[in-house]
Amino acid sequence: MDGSVKHVVMFRFKADTDEKKIAELIRGYESLPKKIEHMKQFEWGADMSVENLHEGFTHCFITTFADVAGRDAYIPHEAHHAYVEQLLPYLEKILVVDFHPNERVSSRT
Amino acid sequence: MDGSVKHVVMFRFKADTDEKKIAELIRGYESLPKKIEHMKQFEWGADMSVENLHEGFTHCFITTFADVAGRDAYIPHEAHHAYVEQLLPYLEKILVVDFHPNERVSSRT
């Protein structure tokens, strides 16, 4: 285990949020790594699972921090706060789980 | 965007599941990449988020498949099915979201 932290976030937007607004809000999240140096990696996508266990969440975002200190600097960062203020009025639900990756198995390459 | 698929799974175990059983069930999940070649990368950890938005989930697991075909081969795979049968009696809740990573930004290295 290295000390890195995976920060997994899921959104469901309110039903009356149009596609243009959703795209704008996602671009806002995408712009954060340029503003917050602690975000070492960032990837996101729309749910395309087929097991019907998504609990209504439609988008997933994974940020990697180098360490807990990076995560702890991100949360109160002014750029993060400004983004959350823009975002929250359009969210129906959100989920956030952080973890230290215990394993990075590449089974076969 | 490459064609890879991130398969994000969250668990909450039933309250009467002891730590030994939880460790055993996690080892079972960890053993799957050796049995299912489609699991190209696997990482997991216990929630250590501080924003209190975990919705009760306590563990997160991220599997990477090379493509949708890999994900679609994993779901009905007999080793996956056998694991799910062992696991389900101990789960209070589960969440599964899959996505194509649209972005892999490394802001600074």
Image (cartoon, coloured by chain):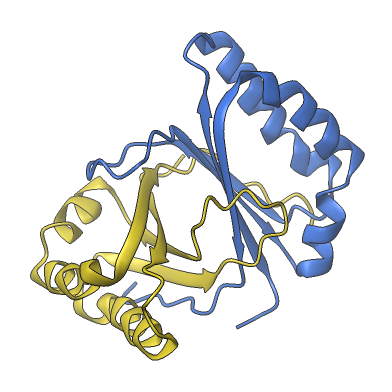
Chain colours: A yellow, B blue
Which part of the image, by quadrant, shows the N terminus of chain B?
bottom right
- Where residue B33 appears, as percent x and y from the top left, is 76, 43
Instruction: Tell whether A75 sits left or right of A28.
Output: left
Residue B84 rendering spot, x and y as whole percentages: 75, 31
- Residue at 56% in and 10% down: B20
Pick whichever, A56 or B48, lies toward us.
A56
**Residue A2 placement: quadrant:** top left
Q: Residue at x 74, y 67 (%)?
A: B66
The number of discs equals 0
Residue B22 figure quarter: top right
Q: Is residue B38 visible?
A: yes
- Answer above or below: position of B78 versus B4: above
Q: Residue at x 41, y 70 (%)?
A: A42
Residue at x-position 64% and y-position 17%:
B24
Furthest residue toward right:
B78
Give the side of residue A9 with respect to residue A107, left or right.
left
Residue B69 appears left or right of A30: right
What is the quadrant of the C terminus of chain B in the image?
Answer: bottom left
Position in image of residue B9 (x %, y %): 58, 45
Which is more toward the observer, A10 or B106?
A10
- Tell me if residue B31 comes above or below residue B23 in the rendering: below
Task: Tell which residue pokes out farthest to the bottom in this image.
Answer: A20
Which of the 4 image quadrants contains residue A87? Answer: bottom left
**Residue A4 visible in image:** no
